[in-house]
Amino acid sequence: MHLATLARHALSRGTTPAAAYALLARRTREPLPSARAVCLALGIPLTVVTRRLNDCYSALLANPRPNSETDTGELLEALGVFDVPVDLTPTGRAVVAHFLTAVDAMGGIRPGHQHGLDRWFTTGNLTTAYLSLAAAHPVPRTGDPATYWTALVTAGELLATTPSPDSRIKYALAHCRAQAAATQATRT
């Protein structure tokens, strides 16, 4: 049976992508084809799959430790290898553009936060991305607070106009507006 078919079957039964990978890798002893099969079963385009697996091949898939399939699957999942990309609407693309402006205005971002944002942009989880940026702050010496908060206010306003916006957007938007106003007050 083809590996992608086995992966689709495992996923259809509620198995997580990490567990499906572990199952296939244990069965075949071939980590790269197993990871590729899970990605393809999830519907991730081959070009994206190839890029993602090339990025982590040396560290995770080239020389696997014995009995490490479960750990490797969880790492692949945490790295976003199994994230299914979504096509954003024009509003979603505009929101991401404002997020990128805010990230630039931060004056520096932790690698883990950047990784999370990249994954949320890929999967279309813009509410979580917004909430994480609204809870962060620009770096005092290198950031541009006015640009940061203005970009987040605009992004929040766009998110608030989407069908059935998450109720947390309203509170985060109010916070961003207050921060923008406070920043403006200190500049004048």
Image (cartoon, helix red, strand yellow):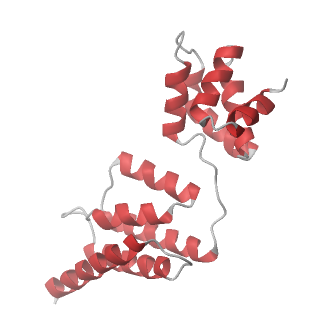
Q: Dividing the picture into quarters, in which one does residue 34 lie?
A: top right
Q: Quadrant of the N terminus?
A: top right
Q: Position of residue 185 (x, y in %)?
A: 16, 87
Q: Looking at this view, is 165 or 173 the one in front?
A: 165
Q: Quadrant of the C terminus?
A: bottom left
Q: Position of residue 74 (x, y in %)?
A: 50, 31
Taking the image as drawn, is residue 59 in sight?
A: no
Taking the image as drawn, is residue 187 in sight?
A: yes
**Does residue 171 appear left or right of residue 52 in this picture?**
left
Residue ranking furthest to the right: 1
**Does residue 95 appear left or right of residue 25 in this picture?**
left
Q: Residue at x 66, y 30 (%)?
A: 35
- Position of 60 relative to 108 (above/below): above
Q: Residue at x 17, y 85 (%)?
A: 187
Residue ranking furthest to the bottom: 188
Q: Looking at this view, is 16 or 47 the one in front?
A: 16
- Position of 24 relative to 9 (above/below): above
